[in-house]
Image (tube, helix red, strand yellow):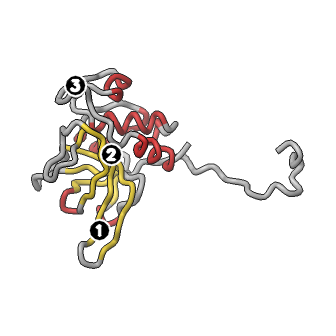
Amino acid sequence: MSLSKVIELARADLGYTESPPGSNMTKYGEAYGMNGVPWCVEVLWFWFNQAGERMAFFGGGKTASCSVLLRWYREQGLTVPVSEVQPGDIALLNFHGKAEPEHCGLVTDVLHDSILGNVIWTIEGNTSSADGSQSNGGMVCEKQRYPRQIVAVCRPQYQPEPEVVDDITGHWAEKEI
């Protein structure tokens, strides 16, 4: 499995909402074993586990805390400057200009704009379609983020993408393939 699988799973969950609204009750919390709590970190754990990338997220462990997640990635030397953000990274966010993360999302795209600077696209759980602070919003959404909102960028160590063989001509198992 790979980074592309994690992003594919995140995209497939766009629009998913907690039920009932305002409860923090989700399939992610149920799978995690801690339902009814803010779930922006739990959804990342879920996608990584479903994609076979369990070890790339928090070393295979569990946390539902943005701060604990950031501390672990820093201790492993797996954080990068916001200017180096790329798809597959985890963006830790704060909407009030503070250094402590309050929310997180999976980076899916980065647009380098000479006027706006970097525009970072994320898929986030427990967010909303509203502007401003989207932490604890109850939904999986794709969001546009700016460097000023990002406290830190964590770089999971994904398994290498499997090699794709396009030409089997002359391969010893050509007939069977």
- Badge nearest the viewer, 2 or 3: 3
Mark 2 Cα within 10 Å, few/some/many (few <14, many 20+)?
few
Q: Are marks 2 and 3 in contact (CB under 8 Å)?
A: no
Q: Quadrant of the N terminus?
A: top right
- For disc 2, the marked residue is 75
Q: CA distance from mark 2 to mark 3?
A: 37 Å
The quarter of the picture where residue 67 lies is top left
As drawn, is 176 to the left or to the right of 79? Answer: right
Which amino acid, by three-letter code, is at mark 2? Glu
User: Is residue 11 found left or right of 67 in the rendered image?
Assistant: right
Give the residue drawn at x 30%, y 27%: 26
Kindly report which numbered mark, 1 or 3, lies closer to the viewer in this rendering. 3
Kindly report the distance in space between the C-alpha atoms of the residues bearing marks 1 and 3. 36 Å
Instruction: Tell me if residue 51 can be seen.
Output: yes
Residue 20 is marked as 3
**Residue drawn at the location 87% of the way across and 46% of the way down:** 173
Residue in the picture at 78% in, 58% down = 167
When the figure is inspected, residue 161 is found, relative to residue 66, above or below; the finding is: below
Nearer to me, 120 or 85:
120
Q: Quadrant of residue 65?
A: top left
The amino acid sitting under disc 3 is Pro
- Residue ID for mark 1: 118
Q: Where residue 129 sits: x, y (%)?
A: 22, 48
**Of residues 37 and 59, the one drawn nearer to the viewer in this rendering:** 37
Of all residues, the one furthest to the bottom in this rendering is 114
Instruction: Of the two numbered discs 2 and 1 on the same chain, state the one appearing first in sequence.
Output: 2
Asked which secondary structure carries label 1, the reply is: strand
Q: Residues within 10 Å of mark 1 (few under 14, many from 20)?
A: some
Q: Quadrant of the C terminus?
A: top right
* Mark 3: secondary structure: loop
Residue 36, percent from left and from top: 23, 24
Q: Which mark is residue 62?
A: none
